[in-house]
Structures are given as structure tokens and as C-alpha cells.
Image (cartoon, rainbow, N blue to C red):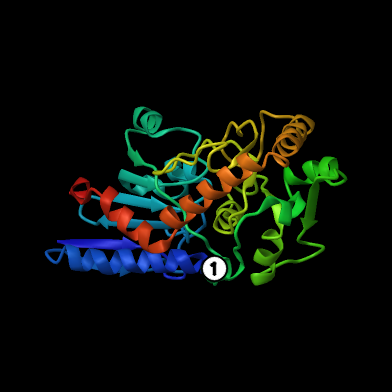
Amino acid sequence: MKLICYYDERAGWNPAFMYIYDSIFKTLKIKYPEYNIEHVHPSVDEKEHCLGCPGGGSHFQIINPENNKTIVMSFWDRGMDVFLKHIGWGKYEIVQYIGGLGMRLNSIQIKEQYDIDHIPYQYPLGVPNAYNYIDECKKEYIPDQKIKKAIFIGAMHGIRKPLYDIMKNHPLVEIIDKSVNYYDGKEFFEKVSQYVLSLSFNGYGELCMRDLESMGLNIPVVRSELLTQFHNPLIPNVHYVRGSDPCSDACSTFLNINPHILAEQFINAIETSINDYDKLIYISNNGSEYFENYCKPDYLVNLFFELLDINKIF
């Protein structure tokens, strides 16, 4: 029997995705020698080849071409797109959905609403050499040896723009607009590692690699409470400082919160945490341990095979 692994071998130019996809494909061929398993790369002119569609760089599929049943593994930060039939998913019968970010529904709700078996997954880094940069830049977390501010480095768009306008002059906040002062590569990691707190706003999705990068650097991250679930839960005020109420659509818009209220919540979280060294060290240790245990590509490959139910595809 033939099975197809359908994924973009370039994986949106994310080196961790590339490694994970290729490792899963190679392991599948070894683990299931009774099947003819082929890799199909989406062609440039395929209508469905877009970020949120089948074949997008953040998706990996195992497809049974005889019945169009598919298992989807997704790192896409608008993971509810997988339920949109009109962007290409309607041609498949999704029998298992592993992962997805920006998920406003939990697995039970997804089963009830879409009759799809969903399992939360984990997320890797994506910047080239990011794991090496973290190893080079991380230091023991000693709060009184850090700059006593929460730092945000990123592009100002969407909800970030009004937050920037409100928070930019607060004495405990440093916001660097990457479109004006561009920090990239190792320089970004060196900069973040100098601060007591890393500040993270929702961007195009709910989770940002900045969150995991900060955890890897031993820097506590202050961010909105997450709705997206992970296989290993990220717990507010355990793995990160809870900065605000969660976004109701688990994405970027914060439709349910006025920017002034959102900014006030973030500022309050920073002000009440920045001198609480016991809390900061506790979150730094927990975040660092979480990163080391659950955010490395080899762990994600092994976890995929723990979660995979290949029999669902037949």
C-alpha cells in the first residue's frame, strides 16, 4: 500500500521544521517497511499551496491516497485554518490532528464540533542557529545583575502598535521596534539576555518564538495567558509571568480587550513581578527546564511517534 508524506521540504525556511519533517519521513519508512511511503513536495503553482493550506510550510501530512484520509501535524500559528474546507482541506478526511497554534478550542471541543481527534503538540525554535545562540548567550539568572526592565524586540503591527504607544515611556519597559532598530541573529539573543524580564505581545499568532527563546536564555517571559494547549502544559506564573487575560480567539487580535486595559494589565504584571526575585528565579528555572525538555527537535520527533495513530488512516 502507498502512503504519501505531503510537505514542503523547505518548510517555510524554518530549519527546525525541515529537520523534524525529514526525520519523521525517514523514520516512517524504517518503522513501516510494509508500506510504500513517498514524499510529495507541493508545486509552486498548486492553488492550495499557501501558508494555512495543505502544503503550507507549517504543515506535515500523512495521506492514504486510496481514501484521502490524512493525519495532519501542524506548527501553523492560526491552527483553526485546518477546519476550513474551502482553502483545500475539504479534499481530505482528517482523522488525526497533531498540534496547531492559536487554537481557541480544546481537543474535546474539536471532537464535538468537527469529529476530528486532536492532540496538542509542542513547538521548536525557528531562527537559523537559534539553539547555538542560546547556548552561547544564556547565563545564570541573577536578577540584580540584569537591567531592571522588561524588554520587547519586534515589529510594530496590529495590536502591538497601540500597546507600544501606551507603554513605550514606562520606566520599567523597553520596546525596540525592529523596523527602526533591527536586532537579528546572535545580537537579538545577547540583548534579551541582559534584562530581568522578556516582554512578549501576540503577533500574527498567539505564541511567538520569542517566548521559547527567552525561556531558553533563562529569562522569565511576561505574556498574555495562553489558550493554546500543549502536550506539556505551559502554566501561567509557573513557566511564564501572566501578563494579561487571554485573547478570546487565541490569535493576534485581542478582540475582547481594549488596548488601554491590556496595557494596564501588562504594566501591573511587570510592576508587581520585577522586584519579586523569588518569583522571577522560580519562573526562570521552570521556563529553562521546560525549554530543555520539550522544545528540542529530536524530542518533537520522538513525541510525534508517541502521539501518532497510523491505523486511523486505513
Q: Would you identify the image quadrant in which residue 304 lies?
A: bottom left
The image quarter containing residue 109 is top left
User: Which one is in front, 126 or 286?
Assistant: 286
Left or right of residue 102, residue 189 in this image? right
Q: Is residue 259 left or right of residue 278?
A: right
| Mark 1 crowd level (few <14, some 14–19, many ≥20, 10 Å Cα) | few
Q: Is residue 264 left or right of residue 225?
A: right
Q: Is residue 277 left or right of residue 51?
A: right
Extreme residue in the left direction? 34
Residue drawn 59% across the image and 63% down it: 138
Q: Position of residue 274 (x, y in %)?
A: 72, 42
Q: Position of residue 262 (x, y in %)?
A: 73, 33
With respect to residue 109, does 179 lie above or below? below
Q: Which percent across, then down, holds residue 161? A: 78, 46
The kind of residue on which mark 1 rests is Asp
Residue on which disc 1 sits:
135
Q: Is residue 90 above or below residue 19?
A: above
